Amino acid sequence: MTESDLDFKVGFEIHQQLATKSKLFCNCSCAEAEKYDSTFVRKLRPTQSELGFYDPAAMFEFSKMKSVEYHAASGSSCLVEADDEPPHEVNQEALETALIFSLALHSRVMDEIHVMRKIVIDGSNTSGFQRTMLVATGGYIEVAGKKVGVQSICLEEDASKLIGDEGGVRKYGLDRLGVPLVEIALEPVTGKPEEIMQVALTLGRLLRASRRVARGLGSIRQDVNVSVMGGAVVEVKGVQQLDQLVKIIEFEKIRQHGLVIISEKLKKISGYAIGDRIEQVTDLLAESSSKMVRKVLESPGSSFQAVRLANFAGLIGFEPYPGIRLGKELGELVRFYGLGGVFHSDELPNYGITKQEVEAVRNRLELGNKDAFVMVGGPDDKVEFAIDAIIRRLKAAHVGVPAETRAATMEGKTVFSRPRPGAARMYPETDIPTFAVTQSLLASLADKVPKSWDKVIDGIAAKYGLNKKLAIQIFDSSYLGLFEDIVAKTKIQPTFIASKLTEDVTSLQRQGLDPAILTDSIIRETFMRLERGAIAKESVVLIFEKLMKKEAKTVDEGIKMLGVSSISDDELGLALDRVISENMATVKEKGMGALSMLMGRSMAVLRGKADGQKINAVLKEKLEKIIS
């Protein structure tokens, strides 16, 4: 089967935080809290829609039976975030930005905007719903000479920040809840992953060109809708980096095609049945020597149940591609009920479970040679939910790819998160009146539509004396605003600042180091030390590296540990005299030809203590005097 046979399609939903002074429905700051000063606990439950239906995603979250612990900080959240006070009027600055993006994308703006409630009971919203409003529909963005259609543009509030999830308690920080967010959904596109990535890159650049969006990791997130062969759409949430995006698209293409192959194999089997018999098998495993089994049974109120799968032998462990199998899908599914995993007959005996124990389970279920079973253990109430979910998932294997929501991993793979939400998810917000969008308002915003990306890049390059490549790198990075601030407050060459914040930080990141450790204040302080002459240019990256490795907590600690305090001209001269003296034989033999070798030895001794160009100039001058 060729790639074109897969009919592979990808649609994007870009979620971009806006750089507003306050949140969407209150006057609290959008800045991240340094520490929290209050806590409260809630337990959310689903409610019926206006039509009397329950949303499947909400029911799934409720089945986990978790309590939610919220952490708040004064200034970054108030009674609105706690759902103890009605929302205020919509932030006009945020609304204006959403309208500007709509004009930039040639979309049709709604005559009247209605605020809606979208059910979310994973705990990320204290109210059990997220407020969102449809601003515009239709339109397009040009990518490599082609038009990619826009489905919708929405303005909504961001969710709380997950800060912990252990046992039966999930913890959230309220500082991010309510931050204005624009969601732009694009029409599905086809092509190679690199070409598809260009669509997300182009849209992200358009938004950043407006200078009205937040920057930094987590401020822009892509939800990716993927389907193959006209099958169900799988939504992958939380993609934050473009290189991660390419890997995820490739992974989902293989995973979904693998599930299609399993489906085709299943359709050729007649008379298979799923879950026609479910049995308690706790007594059969009571004396098991398996550590995994014993760990489950040591918890009070825990048991094992097994499900019969008639004519299913070999299908749960079948791998059309390495790592793609139904058994793995089931393992991801039960973990969301707080269970350690699932056992199935295609992989047993294993994990300390003996052949005799497997045979006992098979006899209890009255299995034939072509039959299989799935077994799961844990607290009785959770096992009941998990068994039901396993049966539904295996029945869905017949159609191939089930519609579901999956989470992105940093390795570029995806894991099951929850079922796709249904039509019963949205209903009107009763606390905020509708408001009209007039033509005069749109006309007043026309001159605020961002320039084309090429013009923005040319403007940055000309203003700061950067080449086009470096101008693109600093624009695409999280540091554009910080770069411009440092340039304005120092006499350091813009080219040097830009290269350190892009090429060098990226190089450190590729070594597995976390760039999030380099806060704006740390970066600013480092360059200010350079401006005052307290450190040399070569020290900047060394300090960044020390901090990103978590070997130092502050710039001062990094300087002290590295011993890179800037030295005086006299100290530099004495250090270079020692280098020349120790290599005098080479100097007499090669003359000026020894300069390169001496420079290498000098940089090793003076690493980070003096500017490389200055070391070279002084060394050359001393060498010329000796030779003459």
Image: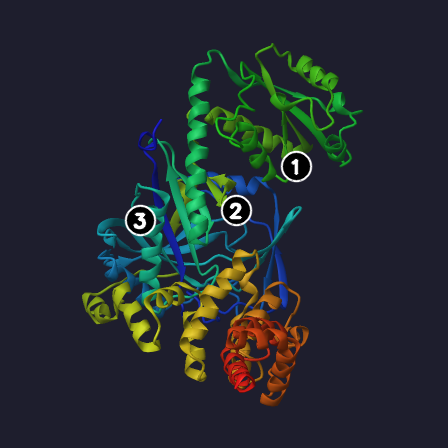
Which sits earlier in the primary sequence, circle 2 or circle 3? 3
Cα distance in 3D space between marks 1 and 3: 38 Å
Look at discs 1 and 2 and give the one toward the viewer.
2
Does the CB distance between marks 1 and 2 fall below 8 Å?
no
- Residue ID for mark 3: 186
At horizontal 52% and vertical 46% (from top left) the residue drawn is: 411
Which sits earlier in the primary sequence, circle 1 or circle 2? 1
- Residue ID for mark 2: 411
Specify whether 518 is left or right of 361: left
Colour treatment of the image: rainbow
- Identify the residue at the far front of this view: 589
Label 1 sits on a secondary structure element that is: loop
At horizontal 44% and vertical 23% (from top left) the residue drawn is: 263
Q: Is residue 356 above or below residue 322?
A: above
- Identify the residue at the far bottom of this view: 570
Q: Position of residue 516 (x, y in %)?
A: 54, 63
Specify whether 418 is left or right of 555: left
Q: Is residue 608 visible?
A: no
Q: Amino acid at mark 1?
A: Gly
In which quadrant will I find the N terminus?
top left
**Neighbourhood count class around disc 1 (C-alpha, 10 Å): few under 14, some 14–19, many 20 upward:** some
Q: Amino acid at mark 3?
A: Leu
Q: Is residue 28 above or below residue 316?
A: below
Does the CB distance between marks 2 and 3 fall below 8 Å?
no
Query: In front: 542, or 353?
Result: 542
Q: Amino acid at mark 2?
A: Glu
Q: Is residue 356 visible?
A: yes
Which sits earlier in the primary sequence, circle 1 or circle 3? 3
Label 2 sits on a secondary structure element that is: loop
**Neighbourhood count class around disc 2 (C-alpha, 10 Å): few under 14, some 14–19, many 20 upward:** few
Cα distance in 3D space between marks 2 and 3: 25 Å
